[in-house]
Image: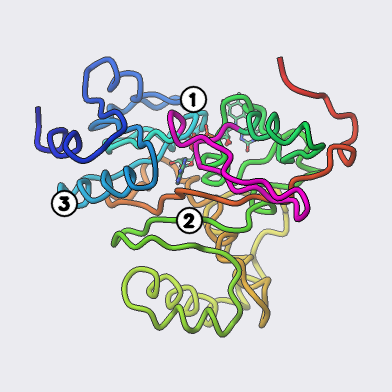
Amino acid sequence: MNDLERELRRVVRGSVRFDPASLLLYSTDASMYQVEPLGVVTPRDPDDVIAAFDVARRQQVALLPRGGGTSLTGQTVNRALVLDFSQHMNGVVEVNAEELWARVQPGLVQDELNAHVRPIGLLFGPDTSTSNRATLGGMIGNNSGGSHSIAYGLTVEHVLELDALLADGTRVRFGTVTPAEFEAKARRDGAEGRIYRELAAIRAEYAEEIRKRYPKHWRRVAGYNLNELVKAGDGPLNMARVLVGAGRHPLREYPGRPRVLAVDSRNRPLRRRADRQADPGPRA
Ligand SMILES: Cc1cc2nc3c(=O)[nH]c(=O)nc-3n(C[C@H](O)[C@H](O)[C@H](O)COP(=O)(O)OP(=O)(O)OC[C@H]3O[C@@H](n4cnc5c(N)ncnc54)[C@H](O)[C@@H]3O)c2cc1C
C-alpha cells in the first residue's frame, strides 16, 4: 500500500479504491482516451472531499472530480486521484417550489432531479442526451445543453450558486455579488481574494476586446464564461456563471494541481412542466 492510499484510508469515510479492477474501470470514460488514475475515492459528504483534498495536497497529486463519466473529450481520465461524486453525494438537498430553485449535491443524476420534482409539476430544463447518467456536477463542469436547448438554454443559465473548494483549501460560495461585495472579496487573502483580483484585472484590461470578439453564437461551451464577466456591466455579477463550463478542457490542458470542486450547487429555474412543449416524459 503506498502513502497516498494509507493516508486516505485513515481519513476518508467513503470508499478508497486502489485495486487493479477499480483502476481499470476508472481509466476510461465515454471518450476515446484511456489513462489509469492513481486511485479512486467516493466521498460520502463535503468533509470527505476536504479530507481527500488535504491528503492530495500534502502528497502533491492532482484531483479529478467525476460524475457519470459521460464526457467525450477525456475530461474524467488522468493520472490523478479521482473523486467519484455519483456514488454517495447524489441527493436533492432542498427544493423551493415558490422561487423555482433546487439545492442539490453534485453527483445527482439529472433524470433523478426531474423525477423528484415531477410530482410538483416542475422540470430542470437542459436535457442532455445522457440525462439518465449525467450528473449536475458534470453538467456544470461541461456547461451541458441538450436536444431542447433552443427552448431551455445551457446549464449556465440555470445555476444560481456553487459551493466550491479552492486550491488553497478555502471553502467558498460563488453567487451573485454587487460591485461593492466584489471589491470587498478582492481584498481578501488567499485563493478567493486572488480569483476576484485577477477577474477584475481581466475585466479592466480586456472588457472591450471580450465585448467585440467573443463569439455571439450562444451554444458555445469552451471554458470560463468571460462574456458573463462583462455582461454585468456596473451591476451585480453572478460569479458561478463565470465558472460553469470550466471543466471542459481537452486532456492535455489539465494542470497538475488540485482544481476547483463544486461540492454543492443550486440550480434554477426549475420550470413548470406545463411550460415544456411536447414533454416526452421519463425515459425508459
Ligand atoms: C452519447 C452521448 C451524448 C451526449 N449528449 C450530450 C448533449 O446532448 N449535450 C451535452 O452538453 N453533452 C452531451 N454529452 C456529453 C456529456 O454526457 C454531458 O456533458 C454530461 O452532462 C456530463 O455529465 P457527467 O456527469 O457524465 O460528467 P463527467 O463526464 O463525469 O464530468 C464532466 C466534467 O465536470 C467535472 N466535474 C464533475 N463533477 C464535478 C464536481 N463535483 N466538481 C467539479 N467538477 C466536476 C469533471 O471533472 C469534468 O471536467 C453526450 C455524451 C455522450 C456519450
Q: Is mark 1 within 8 Å of ligand 1?
A: yes
> Of residues 178 and 69, which is closer to you in this image?
178
- Amino acid type, residue under disc 2 in the picture: Asp
Q: Which residue is mark 1?
A: 30
Badge 2 density bin: few <14, some 14–19, many ≥20, Cα 10 Å:
many
Which residue occupies 46% across, 74% down? 196
Q: Judging from the image, what secondary structure is the residue with disc 1 in?
A: loop
Rounded to the nearest angstrom, the CA distance separating label 3 from label 1 is 31 Å
Question: Could you tell me residue 148's position as x and y percent?
Answer: 78, 37
Locate the N terminus by quadrant: top left
Which residue occupies 66% across, 83% down? 234
Count of labels shown?
3
**In the drawing, what numbered circle is on residue 58?**
3
Say which quarter of the image contains residue 189.
Answer: bottom left
The boundaries of the magenta stretch are 86-109
Which badge, 3 or 2, is on the more N-terminal residue?
3
Label 1 or label 2, whichever lies nearer to me, is 2
Q: How is the image coloured?
A: rainbow
Assign the magenta stretch its main secondary structure: loop
Q: Which residue is mark 2?
A: 163
